[in-house]
Amino acid sequence: MKWLRKKRVLLLLFIGFTAILFLSTNWMSWFYPIHYKDEIRKHSITYDIDPFLVASIIRVETNFKTGRESKKGAIGLMQLMPDTAKWALEKAKLPDVSMEELKHEPSANIELGTWYLSTLSRQFEGKRTAIIAAYNAGPGKVQKWLDEGIWDGTDATIKDIPFGETRHYVQRVNYYYDQYTDIYNEF
């Protein structure tokens, strides 16, 4: 009898959880949260970049965890390479931002990463897939692939990206981008 009572309680809990999950207006956001929304929104507006793209890159790079440093030395939420970060700091003219701040301060890292995405967007004429590939492999390599006809920079030909790491990276960022744009009505 006790066993049957436990089953009923578990069944009621399961039904209750399921009802809450599916009756909630935006239950999928539980599985695909976006942290640092205010910072992403602010810098996306400033540098005219899709905030969902910024959030997708952060999700793939660090899953919104600050203070990360990759094996190759990339730093912060958006995993900027030190040389790229130094170049971008000089070009973006961000006042008094140090490399240490880029590593640990979300807003500074998001601002510089978003600024960098903006420069890539101009270079690759707003083609999201090419921008993502350039963010990972570097704009010089991606431009070479495009110039030599190795890859045309579109979603349909992601399989033609010659670097497996970049190909996989683009697929993952696009996956999260699609999830975020489907789940969230606005940023």
Image (tube, rainbow, N blue to C red):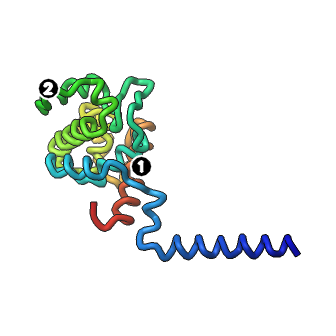
Q: Residue furthest right?
A: 1
Foreground pick, 100 / 170 = 100
Residue found at x 65% / y 71%: 14
Task: Tell me the quarter of the picture where residue 90 sits.
Answer: top left
- Between tags 1 and 2, which lies in front? 2
Residue found at x 42% / y 39%: 65
Image location of residue 32, percent across then percent down: 44, 57
Which residue is the site of mark 2? 90
Could you give the CA–CA distance between mark 1 and mark 2, rounded to whole angstroms?
Answer: 31 Å
Within-10-Å neighbours for mark 2: few <14, some 14–19, many 20+: few
Foreground pick, 148 / 55 = 55
Q: Is residue 185 above or below residue 73?
A: below
What amino acid is at disc 2?
Glu
Image location of residue 64, percent across then percent down: 40, 43
Q: Quadrant of the C terminus?
A: bottom left
Element assignment for label 2: helix
Foreground pick, 138 / 94 = 94
Q: On the rendered structure, is 80 left or right of 97? A: right
Image location of residue 163, percent across then percent down: 41, 36
Q: On the rendered structure, is 40 left or right of 60? A: left
Q: Quadrant of the N terminus?
A: bottom right
| Mark before the other along the chain sequence, 1 or 2 | 2
The numbered disc on residue 35 is none
Which residue is the site of mark 1? 171
Whether residue 77 is visible: yes
Foreground pick, 34 / 123 = 34
Task: Tell me the quarter of the picture where residue 85 sits.
Answer: top left
What amino acid is at disc 1?
Gln
